[in-house]
Amino acid sequence: MTTQFGYACINSTLQELKPRVTCNRGMIQRTFKAKGLQYASELSLQNTADLIKHVAWNHANGVKVFRITSCMFPWHSEYDLTQLPDYEEIKDNLAAAGALAIKHGIRLSTHPGQFNVLTSVREHVVLNSLDELDKHGQVFDLMGLPSSPAAKINIHIGGAYGDRASAIDRWCTNYERLSDSTKSRLTVENDDKPKLYSTKMLYDNIVKRTGTPIVFDSHHFACGPQDSTYEEAFQMAVDSWPRGVRPQCHHSNSRKKYEDPTARVNAHSDWYYEPFNDCGNSVDVVLECKKKEKAVFKYLKDFTTSSHEIRKDYRLDRMHAQVRFPPAVPLLIKKRQNYMHNT
């Protein structure tokens, strides 16, 4: 099996449709305070219905690796999903999206934001992080996704606070406070800042103590602490994954090097100029450049030689936007449309 490539969160082809298809509908805090759970529920219902469309589009276009947005439920920190008026329909949408992904062999994952800091010295930050991460586990449970890193919930471990050893101790202690649903899927990623955590640091201190696998990020390797070679770091990450689960990695190129010399050193480019080096391993790679799914197809055209990996009708100006739904999906979307029409 060869390395597979996918993209993260946003499908610009679907967003360009009218009406747009997106899983990122949200609102500012003032709107949430004014409109409350009812409006959060409406947006969540639309976002989860459109998640089905994203999975269907990925299947139609041969994309087997997709990261789900962490913004599907606006202001989710303020409520539990079961409190939403449309919870039953939302639950049906999540189950349909998960079933469709499993049926077609599409690997789904998520990447909660950098505010999830299990190394924090402040208890309220840790409690908020535990709540946020466990809610991601709940969503993946509702989707019927594997309770393993095959459906990864990926995070950075957080700040070092001038004392990496103590910070790592706090992370390992707080890791044990997570739900089993979350712990079974959790992965950690090497950082893009020299004062934070390399793959080797994660392997020696997180993997060996908790068994949490490492998501190797190639661009972060170039920007972060330099305490091993690329090949050594990559192999440590691969070895951290449980038997039977394909390691997952991230790849991007430097915007500063290739597109804008004024950009931050760790900024991601729009397109790809260097291929991912899998060191001869078969892994799944989330391509993290800014052009999303369009960059995936251009990457395959530019850097792969296996014709079966590239859509024969590939053209950036003619991306396939039509999606085909299984029989149950139009019913869910029709329910959503009827609901929105009557409110």
Image: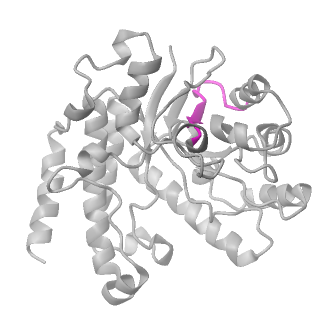
Residue 59 percent across, percent down from the top left: 29, 31
Q: Residue furthest top?
A: 306
Residue 212 horizontal side relative to residue 110, left or right: right
Coloration mode: one colour
Residue 122 visible from this viewpoint: yes
Q: At x 39% / y 86%, what residue is drawn?
A: 30
Q: Which residues are magenta?
A: 240-254
Q: Quadrant of residue 160?
A: bottom right
Residue 3 horizontal side relative to residue 294, left or right: right
Vertical comparison of 275 with 207: above or below: above
Q: Residue furthest bottom?
A: 34
Residue 141 horizontal side relative to residue 315, left or right: right
Q: Is residue 182 magenta?
A: no
Residue 106 horizontal side relative to residue 242, left or right: left
Q: At x 73% / y 59%, what residue is drawn?
A: 158
Residue 281 percent across, percent down from the top left: 62, 17
Residue 36 percent across, percent down from the top left: 34, 84
Q: Is residue 244 magenta?
A: yes
Q: Residue furthest front?
A: 261
Q: At x 26% / y 37%, what residue is drawn?
A: 57
Residue 101 percent across, percent down from the top left: 35, 37
| Magenta stretch prevailing secondary structure | loop
Vertical comparison of 171 with 127: above or below: above
Vertical comparison of 272 with 44: above or below: above
Residue 87 visible from this viewpoint: no
Question: Which residue is more in the foreground, 223 or 61?
Answer: 223
Quadrant placement of the C terminus:
bottom left
Q: At x 72% / y 43%, what residue is drawn?
A: 223
